[in-house]
Amino acid sequence: MTPDNILRYLEHGYVMKLEEQIETAEYIRNLQQSNETLRQGLIEFGNQIFMLRRELVSLQKERREN
């Protein structure tokens, strides 16, 4: 089942067959896992930027002092 089909069923109140419900549930679980993976990646990326920024500021201070 495609995202468009899922939305069509939900928007129009169509009843899904058991197979479609199982497929849709699996699709949603995969989306949730993908979102969690992306979220963790963004957090790690943000932490790396923070650490690099801190390092850059430290190097700039060292250069000014020398």
Image (cartoon, rainbow, N blue to C red):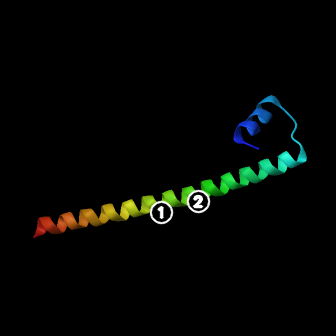
59 relative position to 24: left or right: left
Question: Which image quadrant for residue 2?
Answer: top right
40 relative position to 33: left or right: left
8 relative position to 32: left or right: right
Mark 2–mark 1 distance (CA, rounded to whole Å):
11 Å
Tell which of 22 and 1 is nearer to you.
1
Residue at image point 43% right, 58% down: 46
Three-letter amino acid code at disc 1? Glu
60 relative position to 20: left or right: left
Three-letter amino acid code at disc 2? Thr
Residue farthest front in this picture = 1
> Which one is earlier in the sequence, the residue at label 2 or at label 1?
2
**Quadrant placement of the C terminus:** bottom left
Q: Secondary structure at mark 1?
A: helix
In the picture, the disc for residue 44 is 1
Where residue 31 appears, x then y in whole percent?
67, 52
Where residue 50 appears, x then y in whole percent?
37, 61
Residue farthest top in this picture = 12
Where residue 52 appears, x then y in whole percent?
33, 64
Residue at image point 84% right, 45% down: 20
- Observer-side mark, 2 or 1, equals 2
Q: Which residue does the numbered mark 2 point to in the structure image?
A: 37
Residue at image point 89% right, 47% down: 18
Where residue 58 appears, x then y in whole percent?
24, 67
Tell which of 46 and 19 is nearer to you.
19
**Quadrant placement of the N terminus:** top right
Q: Secondary structure at mark 2?
A: helix
In the picture, the disc for residue 11 is none
Using a 10 Å C-alpha cutoff, classify the residue at mark 1 as few (fewer than 14 neighbours), some (14 to 19) or many (20 or more).
few
Residue at image point 25% right, 62% down: 57
Using a 10 Å C-alpha cutoff, classify the residue at mark 2 as few (fewer than 14 neighbours), some (14 to 19) or many (20 or more).
few
